[in-house]
Amino acid sequence: MAVTGCTQCIKYMLFFFNFVFWLAGGVILGLALWLRHDNKTSNLLLLQFEDNQAPNTFYISVYILIAVGTVMMFVGFLGCYGAIQESQCLLGTFFTCLVILFACEVAAGIWGFMNRETISKELINFYDSAYIKAIETSDSQTKQAAVAVVKVFHDTLDCCGKGSDSPLFNKDTLCKKSTDEQTTNCHVKLKELFTQKQHIIGLAALVIAVIMIFEMIFTMVLCCAIRNTAY
């Protein structure tokens, strides 16, 4: 027997939230693909120096986002179909998936907060190692490779050097700006780059978490109503 009255309203509200959840999964997937192929991050994270690849912690986070977006789209479709069909089995499966996703999101949020500066620190260390070699090494081949890596950082981020405590070597050739102009050091630019992206990811995660809470509530109410209607 189909649900009626207020319960039917909850049914369509659940369908609406599930549809939004499905769309949000698509947005998360699109955002992750944009982060993966963003020119600034790609230029930096694909660099190699002395057989060492640039730290890929950021890409690991992006691949997790791609997986989350895909799962969200599947779960959102499952919820929509379960709500329309008024199926306790589908809604129960949907609720279980929501709980697992919510727990994973909370765990990922805690991990991300505790390691929020790790990505920028890893790239700063990678930049510093190339920067030091470009200044100090006497090996022309190593120096040339180091200068090439450092120049990618400078051109991509429009920055130069490690800060006021270090010389800005060969500014005329390695930096876009002249020696008379104020140049932002690359440590600041790297922190800004990944802080902005982390804020975008954090805001998206917060919106998704709120939607998931409402969906869990509506799913439980609808399941109880369907069970009572059956009797």
Image: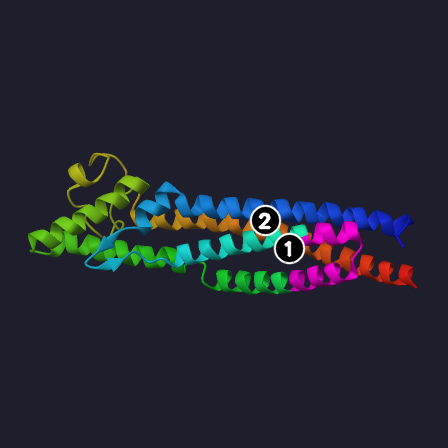
Magenta-colored span: 78-99
Q: Quadrant of residue 176?
A: top left
Three-letter amino acid code at the position of disc 1:
Val
Query: Vertical placement of 106 versus 193: above or below?
Result: below
Q: Which residue is mark 1?
A: 75
Residue 157 appears at what percent x and percent y? 32, 42
Q: Position of residue 3 (x, y in %)?
A: 88, 52
Q: Are marks 2 and 1 in contact (CB under 8 Å)?
A: yes
Q: Position of residue 1 (x, y in %)?
A: 90, 55
Give the residue drawn at x 48%, y 48%: 32
Percent across and percent down for residue 147 are 17, 47
Q: Is residue 227 visible?
A: yes
Secondary structure of the residue carrying tag 1 is helix
Q: Which residue is mark 2?
A: 25
Work out how far the residue at label 2 is from the one at label 1, CA to CA, in angstroms: 9 Å
Question: In this orientation, does residue 183 appear?
Answer: no
Q: Is residue 101 magenta?
A: no
